[in-house]
Image: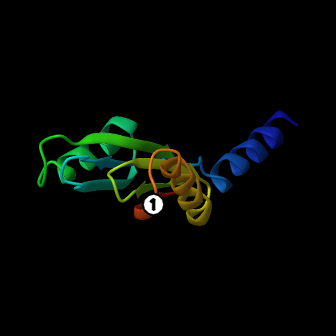
Amino acid sequence: MIRLLTLVALCLVTAFPAIANEYGAIAYSPETRAIGYSHNYNSKSDAQDRAMSNCEQYAYDCRVAITFQNACGALAVGRRGGWGTGWSAGRAEAQTRALNSCSRYDGGCTVRRWVCSK
């Protein structure tokens, strides 16, 4: 009986692999409006580092605007430089949240970058 239970448990473990944590990030420069992003990284810090290095190719004042895990993230920027971010399980909701966040600080907000990591 114990062998049977062990065999069943082993089959279940191999049949359902662990869900990988996949991180993404968006970095932004308020001065130049440069953007860097990353997706599908195994660690939060690796995702942030890649987004920053991509952004820093074009600007000196980049900062990580948003980091997300097994989700989508978005960055919206307004016409006077205000910006906001959002994340969600899906792209559309992440964009909506970014636009809503940006609209609290600026007008004429548009989504400048979205990315999913899952």
Picture coordinates of residue 4, whole percent (x, y): 82, 43
Q: Quadrant of residue 15?
A: bottom right
Residue wearing tag 1: 109
Q: Amino acid at mark 1?
A: Cys
Picture coordinates of residue 91, whole percent (x, y): 55, 64
Q: Quadrant of the N terminus?
A: top right
101 relative to 106 in the view: left or right:
right
In this view of the protein, which residue sits in the foreground, 37 or 95? 95
In this view of the protein, which residue sits in the foreground, 46 or 96? 96
Q: Residue at x 52, y 57 (%)?
A: 99
In this view of the protein, which residue sits in the foreground, 18 or 68? 68
- Would residue 1 be seen by someone viewing this image from the given angle? yes
11 relative to 61 in the view: left or right:
right
Picture coordinates of residue 76, whole percent (x, y): 43, 57
Picture coordinates of residue 54, whole percent (x, y): 20, 53
Q: Residue at x 24, y 55 (%)?
A: 33
